[in-house]
Amino acid sequence: MATATNDMNSGNGLEITSDTNLNGETFSNFKEDGIAVQEDGVSVELEQVEATKNGDDGFDINGDVSNASVSAKNSTFNLNGDDGIDVFGEKNTVDLFRVEASFNEESGLELDGNNNNIKIDTSEFEANRDGLNIPRTGVGNNIDIQDSAFFDNKDDGIDIFGNDNTFTLDRASSTGNVEDGLEIDGSKNKITGSNNNFSNNGGDGFSDDITASGNEITLNATTFRNNGDDGFDIEGSDNTITLKNVSSDGNAEEGFEIDGRNNKVTIQDRSVFGGNKEDGFDIDFRGTGNTVEVIESGFRNNGDDGFDIFGRNNTVTWEDVQSFDNKEQGFEVDGDANTITIKDSFLLDNGSSGFSFDYTGENNNLTINDSEILRNAEDGIEILGNQNTVSLSNVEIYDNGEWGLDIAGNENSITIGSSTFENNQSGAIVIGGDNNILEILAGTNLTADNIVDNGNNNTISFV
């Protein structure tokens, strides 16, 4: 077993220019890299190797190296002055199994190069600046991460600033990091995976930053829990996100927040957003032109609303969704010119109204079909804003603490067909605003006696 332990020797500990097999060797306290690959096409196998306390990287593939093949098993790359492992070349293959890259001044693993294939299995990246970092220069890399952990890093667990990278994440965890569990700053990256955990981070569990665009994210059976900001946050534009059977619980702000534009989000397969201190799902006032589809999922027990739209020109579709036990509304719209369709869903047991257009919610279009709105502490549906269009069909509104439908705003147009209003404590419908149009179609249990008009110039018709 060869051991290199000279104190801060000049240069690198070992420079690899031909096929190399190292077993049980130590490279520490060198001025530059512990181990540096400097020749194209070489094969490097590391078993129980330590590269620690070097002035630069523990292990480095130089920027002009290509087509090298590196396998590191049961090895450690800790306490180095720059990165634990740095892949700067292109078209290299790196396979890490039971590797630890921790307590490095910069990244545990940094991918500066292009078109590299990286596999990470059963490895740990702890207490670095970033656990895994892909800077701007890192383009077109393919990264497969399995059964590995990125935790307690000083910035992000995983930070993707480069473009066109492809990630597979299975049974990975990114927890306890000072900033985000995973942050995307780059564009046109693709991330897929299942059974992952992004929890207890100081910022967001998973974040698509303001500079990010055109990324594609598909995650299944993944948890975003107890993060210091949002569970999942989209600040970028033109991204496509699909979440299946995920949980976003107990976050200090929203379970899911959209601050960006023109994103497409699909949530399905029993996903739950619950116990967050603010909203379960929020489209912030900056969120414009987004499309959100929620299928067979729930928003429960959040500190504010189950679902809140503050932005404008967004399209939201619910099918088989429940929003219940939220402190405020089950669904609130504060923004304008949004289109909302709700089908086969429940808004129940919320601390305020089931559905609410707030005072700032104007020129929105709402369609509710085949749904139930019940046992909310205040109104079933509340319209405080102006010039909204509402269509109800086969909707049951009952057992709410105040009105079934409360129209307090002006110039709204409401059409009700084949719906029932029963046992709402204040009554079926009240109109407090002016110049509203209320059209009652056949198939309801409403009569003129069920409607209280306290406003001016409202039009009420039974068709």
Image (tube, grey):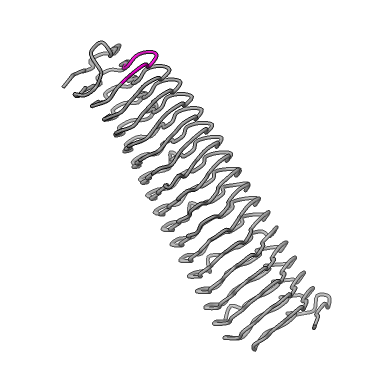
State which region is magenta: 421-429
Please, which residue is most extreme toward the left here?
A: 463
Q: Position of residue 28 (x, y in %)?
A: 78, 74
Horizontal side of 334 relative to 451 (left or right) equals right
131 w.r.t. 7: above or below: above
Q: Quadrant of residue 448?
A: top left
Residue 415 visible from this viewpoint: no
Identify which residue is drawn at 46% across, 31% down: 324
Quadrant (top left, top right, bottom left, bottom right) of the C terminus: top left
Residue 193 visible from this viewpoint: yes
Q: Position of residue 359 (x, y in %)?
A: 39, 25
Asked whether 37 falls inside the magenta stretch, the response is: no
Q: Position of residue 258 (x, y in %)?
A: 45, 44
Quadrant (top left, top right, bottom left, bottom right) of the N terminus: bottom right
Horizontal side of 423 relative to 145 (left or right) equals left
Q: Position of residue 137 (x, y in %)?
A: 53, 69
433 w.r.t. 369: above or below: above
115 w.r.t. 325: above or below: below
Identify which residue is drawn at 55% across, 41% down: 249
Horizontal side of 237 relative to 182 (left or right) equals left
Q: Quadrant of residue 73?
A: bottom right
